[in-house]
Each structure stands twice: as C-alpha cells, then as structure tokens.
C-alpha cells in the first residue's frame, strides 16, 4: 500500500487534565446499543477526549447505527477515530471501483445494512468519515493503534498493513520509550486485559470481544472503555436485541 496518499496519523491536542478525562474504546463491531450504553456509563463530557480504535462495522447487527452515533458525537465532543481492518477493506473496495462506488460489498460489508444503497453503493454521507480515519495516534504517554506495530521493520510507524492486521507483537522500548501501546483487534479475556494493566505491560489490548455475546461466561462479550489517565476499566455487557452474526470473514 502506498502510504503517501493516506492519513497515517494526526496531531492530538493536549487535554486539560484538571477538567477532562481520556478514554479509549475498540472493536465495537456493529453493537450500537451497547456502545451508546457505554458512553452513557462513562458520562462523556465536552471536556473529555474519546479515542476509538477501529472496527466499528460488521459482525454485529447495526453498523449504520454505530457510524451514525460516532458522527453525531463528533459534533459536540472531542472524538478521535482510527481505522480498523474492517473499515480498511471497505475503503479498499471503494478505491478499486475507481470512485463510482458501484461495487459488490459482500462479504466485505457483512451485515452492513443502511451503509449501502439498493445497488450496493456506499452512501455518500459515510465517505468523509471513512476517508478521514487515521492509522495511529501518538499521545504524550501512549501510542494508540488498531492492531499493533511491527517493531522488526525499519520504520514501524509507516507499516500501515501491520497496524491493521498484526495479531501479536513484541514492543521495542528503545523506539517507544516509556509510552505504552493501547490496541484492539484480537479479542482477549477480561482477566488477561486486567493483568496487562496491573503488571505494567508495554502494550494493553482493550478488545474483549463485545460482539461475542454468548461467550460472556467465558470472559468475553463486553465492550470496554479504558480510562487512559487512571487505567480504570468501565465495562458494558452486550445488550443488542438482534442476534449478531456468527460468521466472521476476518477479525
């Protein structure tokens, strides 16, 4: 992929920590009602910053509802969004079509009702949001990314494919220093996530597999918001009333 024509990252304004809080959420996967409930639970204010780490669409029942809510939140709140592999595949299909958007999006846009028209064209109101998505953010104390960084590459911060698809990685602290990496992409059990926080691991996965509602007893099936200032976790169980898809074309 030619990284010169895409938004790899962008600068993030520093928050006034005396007024606001920073939160990170990843892998919403079409669980719109669950996402709304989590935002209500953390009581997001206009002084806060919310970082969303990608994979807003597919798998769950309401991809359209998730994007609509994010776009609405951005009008009044400081919401910064990364792209996940699901958004990337959707936009790749769009680019391959040469811009006329007349492309077959299944299985690329699985369970994406409301995001495409009857001709399976991406609705124009979603393109600016999807095209604006970056691949990583650097904060004063964290790197935020959907999947991870390839620290074996000469420049890990240019390897956008790995930022979307990498499943496991070892952090090179000579490159990132004391900054911790917050990511999603691979669902992890809640106990594992908490241990990464408690043990001071260099990377923390915040994907608890929200879409896997039936696996709640096994430690998955919740949407997680990480307070980046205190490292406290806020959990919201999956409350979607429509059954999510059990099929997964990609993570």
Image (tube, rainbow, N blue to C red):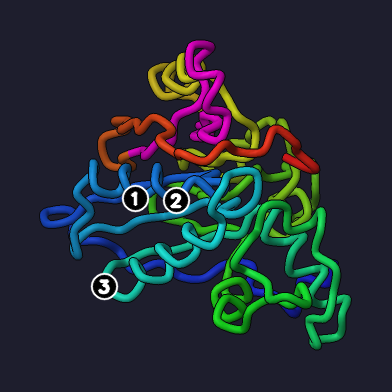
Q: Which residue is mark 3?
A: 76
SS type, badge 1? helix
- Image quarter hosting the C terminus: top right
Establish if 142 lies above or below 81: above
- Nearest the eye: 162 or 218: 218
Bounds of the magenta span?
A: 203-226
Q: Which residue is mark 1?
A: 36
Residue at image point 46% right, 14% down: 191
In the visual, does 33 lie left or right of 106?
left
* Label ID, residue 32: 2
Between circles 2 and 3, the one closer to the viewer is 2
Residue at image point 40% right, 67% down: 12
- Residue 220 drawn at (x, y percent): 52, 22
Q: Marks 1 and 2: in contact by CB < 8 Å?
A: yes
How many neighbours does mark 1 have within 10 angstroms: few (below 14), some (14-19), or many (20 or more)? Answer: some
Residue at image point 62% right, 68% down: 115
């Amino acid at each position: 992929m030619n990284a010169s024509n895409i938004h790899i990252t962008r600068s993030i304004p520093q928050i006034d920590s005396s007024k606001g809080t920073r939160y990170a959420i990843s892998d919403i996967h079409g669980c719109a009602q669950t996402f709304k409930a989590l935002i209500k639970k953390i009581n997001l204010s206009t002084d806060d910053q919310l970082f969303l780490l990608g994979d807003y669409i597919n798998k769950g029942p309401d991809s359209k509802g998730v994007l609509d809510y994010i776009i609405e939140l951005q009008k009044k709140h400081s919401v910064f969004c990364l792209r996940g592999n699901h958004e990337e595949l959707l936009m790749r299909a769009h680019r391959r079509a040469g811009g006329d958007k007349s492309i077959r999006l299944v299985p690329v846009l699985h369970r994406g009702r409301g995001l495409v028209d009857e001709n399976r064209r991406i609705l124009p109101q979603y393109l600016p949001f999807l095209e604006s998505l970056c691949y990583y953010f650097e904060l004063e104390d964290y790197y935020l990314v959907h999947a991870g960084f390839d620290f074996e590459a000469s420049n890990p911060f240019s390897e956008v494919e790995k930022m979307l698809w990498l499943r496991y990685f070892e952090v090179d602290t000579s490159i990132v220093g004391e900054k911790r990496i917050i990511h999603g992409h691979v669902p992890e059990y809640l106990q594992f996530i908490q241990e990464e926080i408690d043990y001071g691991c260099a990377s923390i996965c915040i994907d608890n597999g929200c879409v896997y509602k039936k696996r709640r007893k096994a430690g998955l099936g919740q949407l997680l918001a990480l307070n980046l200032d205190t490292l406290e976790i806020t959990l919201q169980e999956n409350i979607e009333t429509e059954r999510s898809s059990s099929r997964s074309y990609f993570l």
